[in-house]
Amino acid sequence: MAADPSDIRRLERRAKSMLMDKEIPQPKMELVRSLLTNQDLLPGERYSAIISLIQSCPNKKAPRPQNARIEVPGRKSQRAQDVEIPAEPKHPGPEMSSAFIGHLQWKYRDLKLFKKRYLIHANNRLGIGFKKRLIPTKRCMKVFREMVAFQEEVLSSLSAVMLAILKDETIQDPVDFNYLRLIRRWMLETPLVEYQYDTIKWLDRNAFESELKNFVLPFFAFQKVSIERREHILQTIETMLRTLPDYKKEEINEKDPEQVRREKEKLNLAREKRVYDYMVLMRSFLPSKVDEDNKINVLLRNRYDIPTYAEFLRMVMEVLVFWCDMDYRDLERYYEIETPVVRTGDWDYSLSELKKYGKDPESRKRRKVDLLKERLNGYDALLEYLKLKQQGHDLLVRAYEEQWKTGSRRLIDIEEIKDNDFIKFLDGCLNFYNNSYLRLLDGSLIYLDDPVRNPIDGSFFSPEYFSSDTAKLKEILTDFYRFRSDNPITVLSREEVKRICRGQIKSIGHVETLLRSIGAYFYTIAKEVHWLLDLHTTWCGLGAAARDPELLRIPLSERPSFETEAIGRPFPFFDCKINGFQRPSPLDKGLVGRALVDNMENGVFPFLVGFCYQLAWECMHFELLEDLEERKKIIRELRELAGKAL
């Protein structure tokens, strides 16, 4: 079995450190050189042999730092200053000798966790010797068994939680699952408890390190994971736990008999307590702070006088492996403890099992393509509205023309006005909207004919639905007409307006503010009505149009909740046609007798949405531009995924 590269690096550092610190006789130095040049030995065997050969050699005496006399050149000799040369910091690592064993035994004597033991070894000239060391007492082994029991309690449901994550189609991010894989691997470590105590008495430092390393280091590694990520992992565990049969609450129905209801409530209380106890234990292994009062820390403190679980882990490594005083930083530096790294794009699990739950790379790519296409449909519909024409004519140009004809029969070139006097063109479009489409939204009374030509009076929206938007429109119109009155001869081309919206012309920033307000209003109206039309399409697609038509004659008084997106919602009076308005207008002929939501070719409300989107586009509203940019981004992603498939 191949040695762990990190273990080989650690042996190499230890061997090199000992070569620098030990007084090595010439014969042993010759043996060391021969070991270094022997290519038949594996690196781990080579460094272990060197350590075993020279660890009994005495340490070099550290030279005392000498005082240095410092004089300023070009001046008379002044009083010398003593400059202390700082000693090099000691590299954290295990102590090779047993010099501190007595100190460590005295340090933890009150806890009664360790006791002194001698081990016979043969690395000297006589071939016999005794090495003093500390081993865990039976009391210490009891602590280990209690910790392992906690780990087994975690493992009892952890696999089921991970399987529930795999089965959940809504969870597509594998990061939490991959972290749980590491946690499960950590929980499977059961150091020393599988040995008889008579066997533990004869374990040496290397055996203790091999047993404890994978039990201790993951705790400190997970402390480096951000608190936000740890909380997200714990929330995922709790959410999935509540879906498992042993933890899921029974649903209590109003029709349940009293005795059945009480039994269910009792069972639900017990299951809620199980969830609580499990999460309390999980938080003990993934604490936000190592010294918090969690389940394990309280038990260790009350039963064994050990302050925290982290302190217990540090303590056993200090006594059984390092043989000298050390703190958390020494442990982290020596073992190079880093934040656990998990894959963020793939699930760390068997490919055959992932295919069962649609979490394999191919299934995930197909699902991603489907989601991107679904998102693209909404942006494609927006683009269709931006390109929508009425009988081949531009919607805004047609609107300006109809508004112009209400007050004049003189022929004009509207395209020329749009390109060279955009403020005048915008004035006409605002007047058209105010005199025509606004009555469909502000709660005005409308005369309608149902499918069998029976007259109906009603409105599509209550006055409150768009009340804030209507008030905003009044402010916009007031500001716009004030601007026109204050600047009667101001003429701005369409290209100049675009440059103003881009911030390229700073001298008339008040025009930019006005255009931003207009663009924001019309984008908001278009987005809202577009969403309502999509809800109506969903509702019709589910075959709900055959319901009682009386339910369809109610104006919308409040915005539908997002929960209705799955089932849709009918558009009020969708099967009727407009016959007239309580507040008539010369522009009524463009609305009377037409279907309301039939399709983009003839529907009144689709034309309203197209008009609003196109006017927001002319004002270069930033949200609309972002939507179009998002559409391009989705198309690029789809092309990249298609290229990978090839």
Image (tube, rainbow, N blue to C red):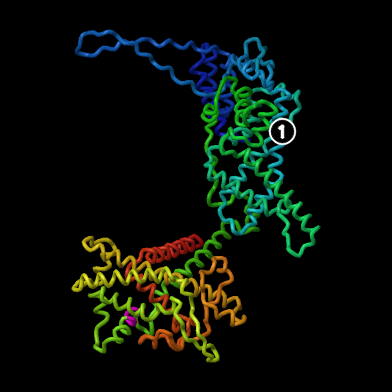
Q: Is residue 382 above or below residue 446?
A: above
Question: Foreground residue, 183 or 579?
Answer: 579
Total labels drawn: 1
Q: Is residue 135 visible?
A: no
The image position of residue 197, as x and y in percent, is: 75, 25
Q: Is residue 521 visible?
A: yes
Q: Is residue 597 above or below residue 351?
A: below
Q: Quadrant of the N terminus?
A: top right
Question: Foreground residue, 368 or 283?
Answer: 283
The image position of residue 275, as x and y in percent, is: 68, 47
How many neighbours does mark 1 have within 10 angstroms: few (below 14), some (14-19), or many (20 or more)?
A: some
Residue at the image point whose x is 57% and y is 45% from the top = 231
Residue at the image point whose x is 48% and y is 10% from the top = 61
Tag 1's secondary structure?
Answer: helix
Q: Is residue 398 magenta?
A: yes
Residue tagged 1: 146
